[in-house]
Structure formats: structure tokens, C-alpha cells
């Protein structure tokens, strides 16, 4: 079975994002970029399936500018077999990404597509769900555990009421939760080997997909600063503070 994993290039999660001066978006020039953390978990899970012999090939795909090749290289250095870059100069919305991944899945015929549950830049949490709908495949979102069975996969999910286990028919779409695994670091020999692995370059046109945006970002602003928080020891102290110190903002 082949596994397709999507790896998005995002601002490194250790970096505090800055809003552009014209409020049109987030500054990405000269900012450290990295693989979306949920996608590292997707890569790790796919590699574990390969190591236990249930997967035969793991393919990583990234969509965006030529710089996304770095993200694919990181996946190859973790142990992925080959990469695919779907190049686009314009920003791709989750729907466009889902349509492109669907076109690729129809070409590659994987048994599983594993995505992150959300990209930490847009926090959309849409792509996996839309991909499953476009393909007509079952979906197991926010997976915190996976167990492969004959022609099926069991997906453990944490929900408000407790823990849910779903059984999906393959091929299926999975999105990863943080609890699924602890991704490995790439070793130095694997980083060197990654440079020799193949990366195919495609475009939306070559896949016959229209990526015209459906939404427009009107304005991006900094989040409001957290208000000062005070702990009180007693109800009497709380009442006193409300009476004499609290102000209506
Ligand atoms: P989102 O729906 O934007 O929160 O993204 C959910 C997941 O879809 C991410 O964790 C990635 O696995 C995948 N994804 C979204 N955009 C891209 C992209 N440009 N390149 C690769 N994967 C992507």
C-alpha cells in the first residue's frame, strides 16, 4: 500500500508572527520556516506503517512556491521515499489544496492520505475534510491512534464524550492530532541521502485544477493584548476589588 502525506511550509512554531505594516497579511520575508507540526506527525505515522511492512511507499507532497522544496527535503530526510512539489506562485486556499490533492490521489492511487488536522498558519482545519468529500472516501479526522486491519483502518479519536473508535474502509483520508505520535528527528546520513531522492514538479494546470481563490483577506491585525489577571484569596477580597478597583473598559 502506498501512503501520500501532505507537508505544508509554515512559519516555524517558535517564531512570533508579525503582521505586515499594511495589514495585508503576515510577514514571511526573512522569517524561519518549517514543516507544519501536524504534518511531521503525519510523516512519522506513515513511516511507522512502512517500517512494520504494511506500507510499501511513502510519498510527501507540498503545495506552494519553489521554496516548499525545503519542506519536502525535510520529509525525505525523515525517511520518505519520494517527493512531489505542486508549484503555485499564488496563495492556495484549503479548497484549492484539496482539489489538487484529490487530482494527485486519483493519479497516485494511495491506500491512505494522511494530512495534519490543521495548518498552524491559517488554522483552517478544512483541507482533509474537503479532500475526503471530493474523493468520496471515508475520513478519520483528529486521529490520536491508528490500527491497520485487512482492507480497513481503525481510527481512535478523542471527542467531548470520551474516546471514539471508527473503522474506515480503505482508501481513506486521515488527519493527525498531536497525541498520535512523537515525530523523529532526521539523522545526518538521512539528510545526506535525502538530496538523492526524486522530487517531481507539477503545476495546477498540469493537474487540470482551477485554483482561483474564493475568499479575500480584507485585513489582518495583531491579537488584543491579554488583560491583567489577578488572583484573589477570598470572596470578600473579590467584592472589594470589584467595588473599588474594577473599571468598565
Ligand atoms: P488547513 O485545512 O489549511 O488547516 O490544513 C490542514 C492540512 O492540510 C495541513 O496540516 C497539511 O497537511 C495540508 N495542507 C494544507 N495546505 C497545504 C499546502 N500548501 N501544502 C501541503 N499540505 C497542505
Image (tube, rainbow, N blue to C red):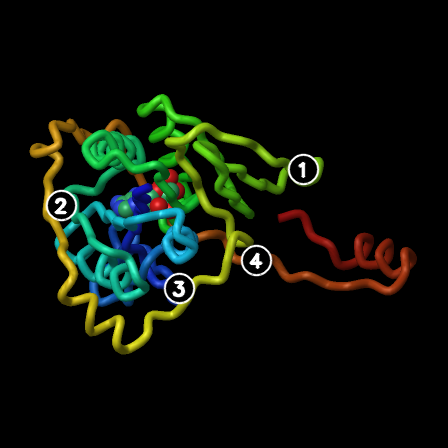
Nearer mark to the viewer, of 4 and 3: 3
Residue located 33% across and 70% down the image? 186
Residue 210: where, in percent of width, then height?
15, 27
x, y percent for residue 205: 8, 32
Q: Residue 12 at what x, y percent from top left?
A: 35, 63
- Sequence-wise, the earlier of marks 3 and 2 is 3
Choose top left, top right, bottom left or bottom right for residue 29: bottom left
209 and 77: which one is in front? 77
Q: Is residue 77 visible?
A: yes
Q: Earlier in the sequence, mark 4 or mark 3?
A: 3
Marks 1 & 3, CB-CB < 8 Å contact: no
Q: Of marks 1 and 2, which one's residue comes earlier in the chain?
A: 2
Position of 77 relative to 8 (above/below): below
Q: Which residue is mark 4?
A: 226
Q: Is residue 224 left or right of residue 11?
A: right
Mark 3: which secondary structure?
loop
SS of the residue under disc 2? strand
Confirm or reject: label 4 Cβ below 8 Å from ligand 1. Answer: no
How many neighbours does mark 3 have within 10 angstroms: few (below 14), some (14-19), or many (20 or more)?
Answer: few
Residue depicted at x 39% and y 64%: 16
Amino acid at each position: 500500500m502506498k501512503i501520500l502525506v501532505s507537508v505544508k511550509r509554515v512559519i516555524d512554531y517558535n517564531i512570533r508572527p508579525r503582521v505586515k505594516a499594511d495589514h495585508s497579511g503576515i510577514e514571511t520575508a526573512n522569517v524561519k520556516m518549517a514543516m507544519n507540526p501536524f504534518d511531521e506527525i503525519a510523516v512519522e505515522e506513515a513511516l511507522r506503517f512502512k517500517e512494520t511492512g504494511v506500507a510499501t511507499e511513502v510519498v510527501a507532497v507540498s503545495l506552494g512556491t519553489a521554496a516548499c522544496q525545503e519542506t519536502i527535503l525535510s520529509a525525505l530526510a525523515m525517511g520518505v521515499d519520494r517527493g512531489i512539489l505542486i508549484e503555485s506562485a499564488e496563495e492556495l486556499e484549503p479548497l484549492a489544496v484539496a482539489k489538487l490533492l484529490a487530482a494527485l490521489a486519483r493519479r497516485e492511487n494511495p491506500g491512505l492520505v494522511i494530512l495534519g488536522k490543521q495548518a498552524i498558519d491559517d488554522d483552517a482545519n478544512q483541507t482533509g475534510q474537503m479532500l475526503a468529500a471530493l474523493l468520496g472516501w471515508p475520513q478519520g479526522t483528529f486521529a490520536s491512534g491508528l490500527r491497520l486491519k485487512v482492507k480497513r483502518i481503525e481510527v481512535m479519536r478523542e471527542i467531548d464524550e470520551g474516546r471514539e473508535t471508527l473503522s474506515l474502509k480503505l482508501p481513506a483520508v486521515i488527519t493527525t492530532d498531536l497525541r498520535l505520535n512523537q515525530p523523529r528527528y532526521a539523522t545526518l546520513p538521512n539528510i545526506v541521502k535525502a538530496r538523492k531522492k526524486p522530487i517531481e514538479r507539477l503545476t495546477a494546470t498540469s493537474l487540470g485544477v482551477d485554483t482561483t481563490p474564493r475568499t479575500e483577506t480584507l485585513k489582518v491585525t495583531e491579537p488584543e493584548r491579554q488583560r491583567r489577571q489577578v488572583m484573589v484569596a477570598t470572596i470578600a477580597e473579590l467584592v472589594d476589588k470589584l467595588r473599588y478597583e474594577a473599571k468598565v473598559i
